[in-house]
Amino acid sequence: MRRITAELFSTLDGVVDAPEKWHIPFHTDAMAALTEETLAASDTMLLGRATYLEHAGYWPDESGRLADLMNGIHKIVYTTTLTDLAWNNSTPAAGDIAARVRELKDGPGGGIAVTGSVSVVRALLRAGLLDELRLIIDPVVAGTGERLFEEGLDHATFGLVESRAFDTGALSVTYSTAPRP
């Protein structure tokens, strides 16, 4: 069975949207290497519309290992409004995300990565389809913004897989969705 790993940037107060407003001062090459590792072990990426548009506006013009991985991976974009996806290897998807992802997990292939895409991560958590959740937590308080754990995502327990501190004060914390004793 294929494994799904999601990676989100977060503030100390749990805000996960608009990281371009607060993440950049805390970003390191070591953080990028974590994303590279996840993408290198994956052959599919799941994205929501907003994250797709953000990534498609940036990555096609970049170079380097991370850009090669982002541009080369097969991207499935959950959207009800976009039909023509110009970024290479991108396929639109709509409808029941849980059913589609269940088929993907049961099928052949490598890992499945999710970068950003809060609505996709929430849907995977609700359906019990996410295997690992990596939060890169920056030492900043946003005050307002979208949080990952909102109504309908209560009472979940996670198992710590790995934690890592960066010189910028940021932390990478990876949890398994299967709780550990």
Image (spheres, grey):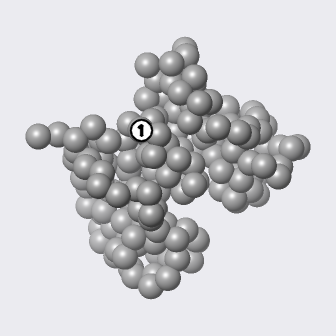
On the image, the x and y values in percent for residue 180 come to 17, 40
On the image, the x and y values in percent for residue 106 come to 51, 18
| Residue drawn at 52 percent across, 33 percent down | 112
| Residue drawn at 65 percent across, 56 percent down | 51
The front one of 150 and 139 is 150
Q: Is residue 150 above or below residue 61?
A: below
Q: Is residue 120 above or below residue 113?
A: below
Task: Indicate the quadrant containing the C terminus: top left, top right, bottom left or bottom right.
Answer: top left
Residue type at mark 1: give it. Answer: Gly
Left or right relative to 153: residue 121: right
Q: Residue furthest left?
A: 181
Left or right relative to 88: residue 178: left
| Residue drawn at 62 percent across, 30 percent down | 100
| Residue drawn at 74 percent across, 56 percent down | 53
Neighbor class of circle 1 (other Cα within 10 Å; few <14, some 14-19, many 20+) is: few
Q: Quadrant of residue 132?
A: top left
The front one of 99 and 55 is 99
Q: Is residue 51 above or below residue 26?
A: above
Q: Is residue 58 visible?
A: no
- Per the image, the residue denoted by label 1 is 128
The front one of 117 and 36 is 117
On the image, the x and y values in percent for residue 175 come to 29, 47
